[in-house]
Image: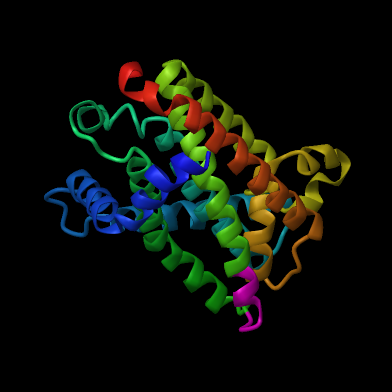
Amino acid sequence: MIKVIKEDILPSIKSWHLWSVLGWLELRQRYKRSSIGPFWITISMGLLIIALGYIYGELFGVKLEEYLPLLAIGLVFWVFMNGVITEGCQAFISSSPYIGQLPTNKFIFIMQTVWRNFVMLIHNFIIVIAVVIYYDTLTISSIPIFLLGFIIVLLNLFWICLLCAITSLRFRDFPQIVASFMQIIFYITPILFSGTMLSKYKLLLAFNPFAWFIDIIRSPLIGQKADLYSYYNALTLLVFGTIFTIYIYKISYKKIAYWI
């Protein structure tokens, strides 16, 4: 495990100029000849949040000033997490020409996937900033707590992305399974609603990692305290998930080129 970290993962992280350029070029290619480029993501996300805010706020009987920040933050960060995981399934498959022909560190393509979705998150984060400022839900003291929660989630996404990439390369039906799984998770995770609305179904929150992730990211931004249970579980998942995934990466590393 130590060997694969020293020879592949750490050099890949240090090669920031490579994975950052690859991720940025892929985004530019997606929005080639578009006047405002990736900001179309921000516009469509903003319109969706406004529409859902009015409709679901009315259905749930929640005031707009309470519901819109909850919805905006939850949806923006869900799109980020969902993007990293579903696109992570294709990280090695879509990079097969590089892996098959060049002696490139393979973790670079995981960094590329996370970086590309992080850039998209930055575009959508404009909506979060606008909402928390307009409704005055953010305090200066809560910013470090939010950053701590985001870092924990981001580190978890790295090992999940890597594990999905390896599994998808070996079993080509796995990306479809992940896509279907993420659709189901979306509806049982407090994104369109708050966790208190699921008080009768506490197990859906207690054993749902994405509920922990949303809680430790969203709560500081809406002036609430995240459950310590969420921090504890997210950190535990980070430790054991990282160790397990690095072990799988170690035993699979030399087979990746053949699976392509």
142 part of magenta stretch: yes
Please determine whether, in this image, residue 186 is positioned above or below residue 236.
Answer: above
Q: Main secondary structure of the magenta part?
A: helix
Tell which of 252 and 165 is nearer to you: 252
- At horizontal 51% and vertical 43% (from top left) the residue drawn is 2
Question: Which residue is painted at 32% across and 26% down in the image?
Answer: 93
Q: Is residue 149 above or below residue 52?
A: below
Residue at the location (50% across, 46% down)?
A: 158
Q: Is residue 224 left or right of residue 21?
A: right
Where is 108 relative to 66, above or below? above
Q: Position of residue 22 (x, y in %)?
A: 23, 48
* Extreme-right residue of the structure: 200
Q: Is residue 37 magenta?
A: no
State how many labels appear.
Answer: 0
* Range of residues picked out in magenta: 139-146
Q: Position of residue 134 (x, y in %)?
A: 54, 77
Residue 172: % across, % down? 41, 16
> Could you tell me if residue 85 is visible in this image?
no
Q: Which picture quadrant has residue 37?
A: bottom left
* Foreground residue among 123 and 44: 123
